[in-house]
Amino acid sequence: MCRAVSVRFLCACGVLELLLFVAGCSRTKYQSFVESGFGEQVASRMRWEAKLPYQASDSLEIVSTSGGEVLLSDPQSQFHLTKIPLGPEGRPAGPLHREIENGDVCERIGPGSLLVTGDRSRRKFITVVDAGNLTTRFSAALAFQPDADISVPGHKQIDDTLIYYRSNLAINHYSSSDGVYEYSTPYVRDGVYDIHMVDLRTGETHSFEAIKSDSLPSLASELAAAKLVAAAPRMPDISGVSSPSRRRVIDGAIYLLDQFFLMDEGRTLIFSLANLNDDRLYYLADVRRGAQSIESHSARELVERYPTELVSTPKQPKEKLDEAKSRDLDISGKVYSPDRFSVLSHGIVMLARVKLGEDRYSPNRFVVGLRMGDEGVVGLERKWEYGLKHEMDIRSVLEDPYGNAVYFPEVDQEGALRLIGFDASDGRQLQGFPANFRIEKKDGKKLVQVVGTAVDFERNLLFLHDASKNRIVCAALREAPR
């Protein structure tokens, strides 16, 4: 399967490091729970089975199992959406099935509504579907600028409005020499930003397309200053003074779309751009007039204008940790590069690589139990650690909020994939359960993802896609105690 994936940039040691996930062709391998030797176990615990109304692929996802139904999505050439209603006793009724064009993923966006999105040729396709009968309410195609050197997409839902946005930054380099060394100093040449707003009630769309950095006064001056610093002769680094100063200015020019607020009953949009130094520029715009109405404002001016609406709230631990994923963290004397965090009631579990040296990291990931101190992310402490036995990038984990546990893909002695669980509080290893895995090899990397598997830990239920029989099965997750 060939698909373009966004480019992610980080800044380290005063230069921009490019982590390129470029467009390429991938190869996939599927390992079903039956191939893993769990077929008999699942059969002995089975509660029910439901045949699928079409030939499903090994990319099938179980979107949700709540609300008296099982919702499935399957991104083939046509996007397949399937709902299996469950009766009062939890038994399946006849499935409801629809095909939708230009779909990749499905998610719930509110009572009675589903959102199907897909990316095709620089356009984001969105389709809002009635969760009851799976009929399409409306669809839209949102255009974005071509990917630049730095291209960071995102989306946010504010009440009944969906906001999709993308930041595109072009990077140039200045070459210089101090007579001994040759230097290549990066700087942001310019930026282009796209913002699209979709009303979920009516399907009405308002767009701010191709907002150029030179049309945003505050941003234009920031980029000009950083360009001058990059072009200036490089001075010797004396006692660590010059280098951090230069780096801070260059980092300060990497501004990405950050926060969004809707005011005046949705007629006014406030958005911010944030750089790698956590500085912010604020802008206000009339939603209906578009990009020509954008005005630069200070945070104080906006708070004075909207004193009750713009009230800052303390960030939750998960928000602070998610922000920390973009940088290395020194935790209890060891430096980690985080992939993801799971925040449970009695502990935090981090999936990360260990930094071995300058720009060198462990090929495998570590599962690390953490305690957050009074100083937040800065005060994280390591409680326990486990090194996974494979080097694959992990795209999905399963969290059990009731058992205070997280489950990760691991390999056994024969090299087959299994789930391994950890108690977040003390690192105690927990027995896994049957699951389906998809391994994708792309651009020299292997990625592993749990697919066609869902768990209701509260009700002790396991839902699996049985590809060999083109069905969905529901079984007891654990045997009842005797």
Image (cartoon, rainbow, N blue to C red):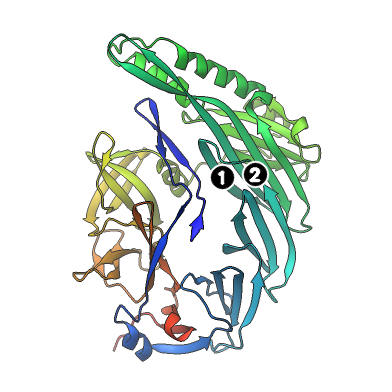
Q: Residue at x 46, y 41 (%)?
A: 8
Q: Residue at x 72, y 51 (%)?
A: 198
Residue receiving disc 2: 144
Circles 1, 2 touching at the beta carbon (< 8 Å): yes
Residue 420 seen from this side: yes
Count every numbered label the image shows and give the total: 2
The tag on residue 367 is none
Of 139 and 239, the residue lying toward us: 139
Label 2 environment density (alpha carbons within 10 Å; few <14, some 14–19, many ≥20): many
Of 363 and 324, the residue lying toward us: 363
Q: Percent x, y for residue 99? A: 65, 73
The answer to whether residue 283 is left or right of residue 77 is: right
Residue 256 seen from this side: no
Q: Residue at x 60, y 76 (%)?
A: 82
> Of all residues shown, which one is farthest toward the left?
413
CA separation in Å, label 1 and label 2 = 10 Å
Label 1: element kind: strand
Label 2: element kind: loop
Front disc: 1 or 2: 2
Label 1 environment density (alpha carbons within 10 Å; few <14, some 14–19, many ≥20): some
The three-letter code of the residue at mark 1 reads: Pro
Locate residue 309: give its quadrant: top right
